[in-house]
Image (cartoon, rainbow, N blue to C red):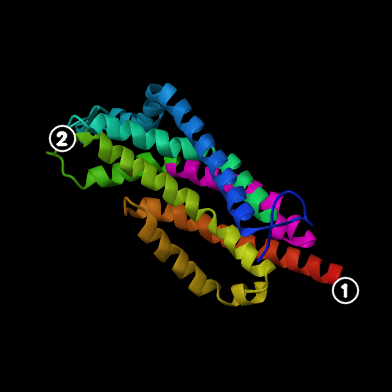
Amino acid sequence: MAFRGSKSDTTTMSLGEHLGELRMRLIRSIISVALGASAILAFYDPVLKFLTRPYRELCKNRPDFKCDGSLFALGPLDGLSARMKIAGYGGLIIALPVVLWQLWRFIVPALSKKEKKYTVPFIGSSVVLFVGGCALAYWTLSRALEFLISWSGTEVNQAFQITKYVSLVILMVLAFGVGFLSPLLIVFLQLVGVLTPRTLIKQWRIAIVTIFFMAAIITPSGDPITLMALGLPLTLLYFVAILIGFIATRKRARSDD
């Protein structure tokens, strides 16, 4: 059994060569993530200050919350755990273009000529949408914290543990970033013929309910502000994905004719 590799469109590769190609792409991706993580570690203090800015500004603007924006380590491993989490996930975000490029270089020989032209736009769109989702999560963080803290009561002092705060921020960023990639899946399913724009339009009510249901599941804070901040843009992107799929499928149909 032979597989086509990345050397050329006409060159076939054995199973061992195919696995070797996969190993090379994985190693390059891991190295890029490691370099990104190293950069985060080198600038850890500014990065941590950036991540805690919404919390500090909230404490400054709401003195009734009885907090000063400080984080606390309740165990000897809390600081190291928080640092490694920030470095690991931050390195992955920095290396995302490289990781997607290595993935593309691995699978592109198996694609047809018509399919290849969609690959670069998909990679570029993936990076833009993921980063856009992360930025929206960061912008929403202070509002989510304000909602959650308001439920504590007026006599409760706020003292956030660093590992739990970092975990909340990371989960929110990943939830928004991954959620913003869903329109690409919708466009892809239209291009391969699994779904049609007409079907998606007919099922828009079910789609919107599903979007908000999934947003409620993946948002770690569980507050309505974060839910709306994720659900509304995804609803808009749903219809944008239908429009893009309609244009792409119509153009491809004309090309085939």
From the image, tell me which residue sits under label 2. 157
Q: Position of residue 254 (x, y in %)?
A: 85, 70
Q: Looking at the magenta stretch, what is its main secondary structure?
A: helix
Q: Compared to 191, does 51 lie above or below?
A: above
Mark 1 lies on a secondary structure that is: loop
Q: Which residue does the image show at 62% across and 68% down from the upper left?
A: 189
Query: Could you tell me which residue is drawn at 65 percent across and 55 percent down?
Result: 107
Q: Residue at x 43, y 39 (%)?
A: 89
Which of discs 2 and 1 lies nearer the camera? The answer is 1
Residue in front for this viewpoint, 36 or 238? 36
Identify the residue position indicated by label 1 in the image.
Answer: 257
Q: Percent position (x, y) of residue 247?
A: 75, 64
Residue 235 in the figure: left or right of residue 244: left
Residue 209: quarter of image: bottom left
User: How busy is the neighbourhood of tag 2: few (under 14 within 10 Å), some, or many (20 plus)?
Assistant: some
- Say what secondary structure mark 2 lies in: loop
Question: Which span is picked out in magenta?
Answer: 109-137
77, above or below 215, in the image: above
**Type of amino acid under label 2:** Asn
Whether 104 is among the magenta residues is: no
In front of the other: 224 or 207: 207
Q: Is residue 204 shown left or right of residue 218? A: right
Q: Could you tell whether 185 is left or right of 138 in the image?
A: right
How far across and how far down the image is residue 77, in percent?
Answer: 22, 32
Residue 242: horizontal and vertical position, in percent?
Answer: 64, 65
Amino acid type for the residue under numbered disc 1: Asp
Residue drawn at (32%, 54%), measured in percent from left and top?
Answer: 222
Gap between marks 2 and 1 measured at Cα: 69 Å
Q: Is 254 left or right of 154, judged from the image as shown?
A: right
Q: Quadrant of the N terminus?
A: bottom right
